[in-house]
Amino acid sequence: MRKKLLMGNWKMNKTIAEAVKFVEECDSIVDTAEKNNIDLGVAPTFLSLKDVKAKAPKGLIISAQNVNDQTSGAFTGEVSPEMLQEIKVTWAIIGHSERRTYNGETSQACNKKMIKLLNQNMVPLYCCGETLETYEKGETKNFIKDQIVAGFKDIPCDKAKNVVIAYEPIWSIGTGKNASKEIAQDICAFIRATIKELYGEGTANDIRILYGGSVKPNNIKEYLTSPDIDGALVGGASLAVDSFHDLLMNIIQ
Ligand code: PGA
């Protein structure tokens, strides 16, 4: 049985003080998640990571929103996996569509980051998703397949299952136009089938695939009851403690 995962992506929101305040108010939410066998996490900015990690309840996953594929060196503005490990942060979101769009991140660059993270025994949360144009042309599956194949290049079978994949159609992110549960399930099943082609049934059954894009407390349940959707990557609705709590409760109830 794959463990469900609810991950908040805070993007460029919250000062250090605000981020710490949020996690300090999370004890009972984390407790409820643990009792219901659900993984729960948030991804603050690099600047907040250290304090958030230090102040957060133990069971809350703290993830970076990005990472470099090198250990150290002349890479201005970058942060390495080893630096994250020093503050006990072991997760990183890779290839979010905003980084692909605004920072020119390619699936090939994501692949290098994933290999590096896996070699460090860290967890990559690899995002994929198509533009509205690709969706309207009916080319979503080809596009996603390319992102998955390129992202997983040279990643061995014994490590592949440690990656978490998030399917996030770009047209649904921050727009309030969430994909229907049928579309989300169809593409997540397709991603699982692609992983099966690459790694076989065992890995396909083990790997966790999330949906993301305008997930809110009132629609999260429909995704989480779909057979191939193992959780959600949530932006806007993860920013307030109340809403984060409601997201979790609406998975459970
Ligand atoms: P959203 O963002 O929930 O605000 O649409 C999702 C994401 O970008 O991960």
Image (spheres, rainbow, N blue to C red):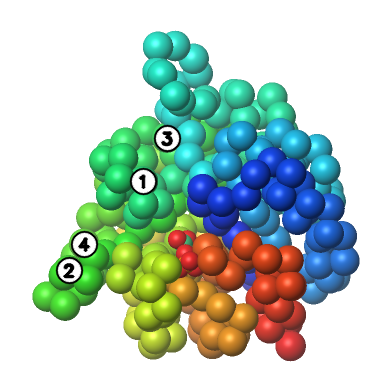
Pick out the residue farthest to the left. 137
Look at discs 3 and 1 and give the one toward the viewer. Answer: 1
Question: Where does residue 163 sit, x and y in percent of width and height?
Answer: 51, 50
Query: Going 84% across and 71% down the picture, which residue do you hit?
Result: 32
Residue at x 16%, y 77% (from the top left corner): 136
Q: Is mark 3 within 8 Å of ligand 1?
A: no
Per the image, label 2 sits on a secondary structure element best described as helix
Cα–Cα gap, marks 4 and 2 = 8 Å
Provide the residue designation for mark 1.
Answer: 99
Q: Quadrant of the C terminus?
A: bottom right
Using a 10 Å C-alpha cutoff, classify the residue at mark 1 as few (fewer than 14 neighbours), some (14 to 19) or many (20 or more).
some
Q: Residue at point 32% right, 65% down?
A: 170
In the rendered structure, the answer to whether residue 150 lies left or right of residue 115 reads left
Q: Earlier in the sequence, mark 3 or mark 4?
A: 3
Circles 4 and 2: CB atoms closer than 8 Å = yes
Give the Cα distance between marks 4 and 1: 17 Å
How far apart are the two marked residues, 3 and 2, measured between alpha carbons? Answer: 26 Å
The mark closer to the camera, 4 or 1, is: 1
User: In x, y percent, where is residue 58?
Assistant: 83, 48
Q: Mark 3 — residue?
A: 113
Q: Amino acid at mark 4?
A: Phe
**Marking on residue 134:** 2
Position of residue 177 relative to residue 105, above or below, is below
Residue neighbourhood size for the residue with mark 3, other residues' Cα within 10 Å, grouped as few (<14), some (14–19), many (≥20): many
Whether label 3 touches label 4, CB < 8 Å = no
Mark seen at residue 143: 4
Q: Amino acid at mark 3?
A: Lys
Residue 197 percent across, percent down from the top left = 32, 61
Q: Amino acid at mark 2?
A: Thr
Which of discs 3 and 2 lies nearer the camera? The answer is 2
Select label 4 or label 2 by which is in front.
Answer: 2
Could one spot residue 17 in this view of the protein? yes
